[in-house]
Image (cartoon, helix red, strand yellow):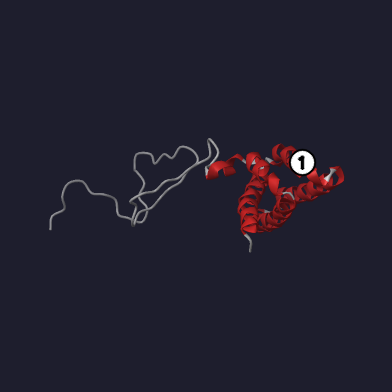
Amino acid sequence: MAASELDVMALAVPAASAVAAEMARGGWLTLRSALARFFRRDGDSAVERQLELLDTAEQALAEAAEEDCDELRSRLEQRLVLQLAAYLDRYPDMGEELAALLPALQDGTPAAGAPALTAQNNTNSQIVQASGNLDAGSGGINYGVPPRTRGRERL
């Protein structure tokens, strides 16, 4: 595989994942117009056809039973990877524009306000990630370990 092919896939894979995630969250209409501008090089009729396919995929995802959502999203991501990679292969100069459409892809850093997790020196420990407040109440959080005792235990 040539270096340019690797670059196309390196951008297409996270972009497809971001688009599918946005569809799953219900934010497709916001992203739709940006993708229409992105696909403009193929002409108006081709753009409409691309968007029809994506609209159909988003509708299927929205109407899917909860147990089918992961599989549908995975198939959508696979199709989007191919679709975006083929487009970027035809128009390699559009890579920067695609990255600009998806803030989470810029410089490889998450978008502002996106959750981030850093875990250091955590051998044999549990990590909890929450996208909001996490309140353990007065009892604390213990996962798979006995609660701490007060004072020293006698041997």
Name the amino acid, label 1.
Ala
Image quadrant for the N terminus? Answer: bottom right
Residue 25, quarter of the rendered image: top right
Say which residue appears at 54% left-offset and 42% top-offset. 107
Residue 6, quarter of the rendered image: bottom right
Toward the viewer: 74 or 85?
Answer: 85
Say which residue appears at 39% left-offset and 48% top-offset. 119
- Left or right: 29 as drawn, with respect to 120: right
**Where residue 103 sits: x, y (%)?**
60, 39
**Where residue 26 sits: x, y (%)?**
68, 42
The residue most toward the left is 155
The residue most toward the bottom is 1
Toward the viewer: 118 or 83?
Answer: 83
Say which residue appears at 63% left-offset and 61% top-offset. 2
**Where residue 102 sits: x, y (%)?**
63, 41
- Left or right: 150 as drawn, with respect to 127: left
**Where residue 32 sits: x, y (%)?**
74, 40
Crowding near pointer 1: few (<14 within 10 Å), some, many (20+)? some
Say which residue appears at 17% left-offset and 46% top-offset. 151
Residue 70, quarter of the rendered image: bottom right
Toward the viewer: 126 or 38?
Answer: 38
Task: Identify the residue position indicated by label 1 in the image.
Answer: 36
